């Protein structure tokens, strides 16, 4: 995640390979956090949770 809000999706492996980039449309000054199958991304104005909902 860049400060400009661009998230890069990388392939797991011995070589660096960008699979995609995603523009959040706003500044992101925090490192994404992972917990219980969710990815949390904090921007200047919101907190996003990405993943399957838990029951």
Image (tube, rainbow, N blue to C red):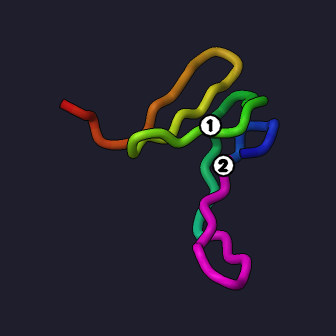
Residue 30: image location, x then y, percent? 73, 31
Q: Report the side of 4 relative to 7 (left or right).
A: right
Q: Report the side of 54 relative to 25 (left or right).
A: left
From this view, report whether residue 22 is shown above or below residue 43.
below
Q: Report the side of 4 relative to 18 (left or right).
A: right
First-in-chain label (2 vs 1): 2
The part of the chain drawn in magenta is 7-18
Question: Who is closer to the viewer here, 8 or 36?
Answer: 36
From this view, report whether residue 46 is shown above or below residue 22.
above
From this view, report whether residue 8 is shown above or below residue 41.
below
Q: Is residue 9 magenta?
A: yes
Residue, disc 1: 24
Q: Residues within 10 Å of mark 2 (few under 14, many from 20)?
A: some
Residue, disc 2: 7
Task: Kindly check if marks 2 and 1 are in contact, taking CB atoms under 8 A apart as contact.
Answer: yes
Q: Is residue 54 magenta?
A: no
Q: Quadrant of the C terminus?
A: top left
Q: Quadrant of the N terminus?
A: top right
Residue 37 figure quarter: top left
Residue 6: image location, x then y, percent? 71, 45
- x 64%, y 15%: residue: 45
Foreground disc of the pair 2, 1? 2
Spot the residue most to the left.
55
Residue 12 figure quarter: bottom right
- x 62%, y 81%: residue: 13
Spot the residue most to the top.
45
Q: Residues within 10 Å of mark 1 (few under 14, many from 20)?
A: some
> Mark 1: which secondary structure?
loop
Q: Report the side of 11 relative to 52 (left or right).
A: right
Residue 15: image location, x then y, percent? 71, 83
Question: Who is closer to the viewer here, 49 or 25?
Answer: 49
Residue 25: image location, x then y, percent? 65, 33
């Amino acid at each position: 995640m860049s400060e400009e809000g661009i998230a890069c999706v990388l392939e797991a492996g011995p070589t660096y390979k960008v699979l995609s980039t995603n523009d959040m449309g706003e500044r992101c000054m925090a490192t994404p956090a992972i917990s219980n199958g969710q990815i949390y991304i904090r921007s200047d104005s919101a907190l996003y949770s990405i993943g399957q909902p838990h029951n």
